[in-house]
Image (cartoon, rainbow, N blue to C red):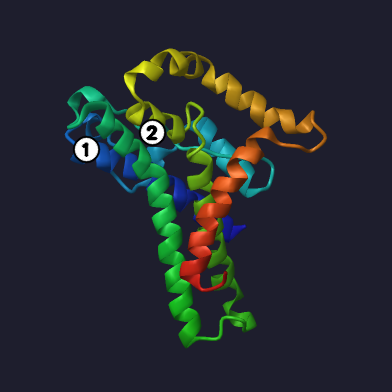
Amino acid sequence: MVGAAIALVLGLTIHEFAHAWTANRLGDPTPRWAGRVTLNPIAHLDPIGALMLLLMILGRAPLAWGKPVPINPAYMRWGRRGAALATLAGPLSNLLLALAVALLGRLVHAAIDLSQPRYSGAVVLIGSLMVYNVALAAFNLIPIPPLDGFGILEGIAPFSWERFLAPVRQYGVWILLILILSSNLLGGFSPLGSIWHPIFDALWGLVAWVGGFR
């Protein structure tokens, strides 16, 4: 439980900080004005998201989230392309953290036998950091609003796609909620999971390769 708590809090903090830092570097002062260019976890949690985080740590909720970072593409270099880059920074930061932990674990294991019981806590923490950060990256890459995947798609899609993206943007939260809840009505089949699992598997394959345990 402690490993999961550390992994989730760190993962959500890094994720939101990456959005804010990248947007700020691209010329948008909005995240800085909102006090979001910080690694202080409290700045990136909202009340409901914090409650869901606690429930997720306890195994009572399927997901948790941080407070959305306010960005304004009008300030940014490259406009909506810049906004897409700032949006991509969130899940990318989770993947990079998982890769760094995997590499560190590989190097430590080469010097120390981590299978010994006294290192079990460290092994759990390393595993939690990898799994939860890959899970966060994969989930946020799903192209349904308000997830990052849709923001990335908006930024790179041609303007001719707007007529298709507009209704998805308007009803995206409801679409996502229906997909999350529908697994209970479909005999265990999860439409959202069918989108999430291939993304997770691809990212996890990369992390496993870097960690040397594929």
Cα distance in 3D space between marks 2 and 1: 17 Å
- Comes first in the chain, label 2 or label 1: 1
Q: Position of residue 148 (x, y in %)?
A: 43, 34
Q: Is residue 36 left or right of residue 203?
A: left
Q: Is residue 67 above or below residue 115?
A: above
Q: Is residue 8 left or right of residue 184?
A: left
Give the residue at x 38% y 50%.
93
Of circles 2 and 1, the one toward us is: 2
Q: Is residue 133 left or right of residue 74?
A: right
User: For the view shown, which residue lies furthest in the right direction?
Assistant: 187
Query: Regarding mark 1 in the picture, which secondary structure is present there?
Result: helix
Query: Regarding mark 2 in the picture, which secondary structure is present there?
Result: helix
**Of the pair 193 and 180, the residue shown nearer to us:** 193
Give the residue at x 48% y 32%.
147
Q: Label 2 belongs to which residue?
A: 152
Q: Position of residue 152 (x, y in %)?
A: 38, 33
Q: Position of residue 32 (x, y in %)?
A: 23, 35
Local packing at callout 1 (Cα closer than 10 Å; few below 14, some 14-19, many 20+) is: many
Q: Quadrant of the N terminus?
A: bottom right
Give, as a three-letter code, the residue at label 1: Asn
Give, as a three-letter code, the residue at label 2: Ile
For residue 208, say whether it is visible: yes
Q: Label 1 belongs to which residue?
A: 24
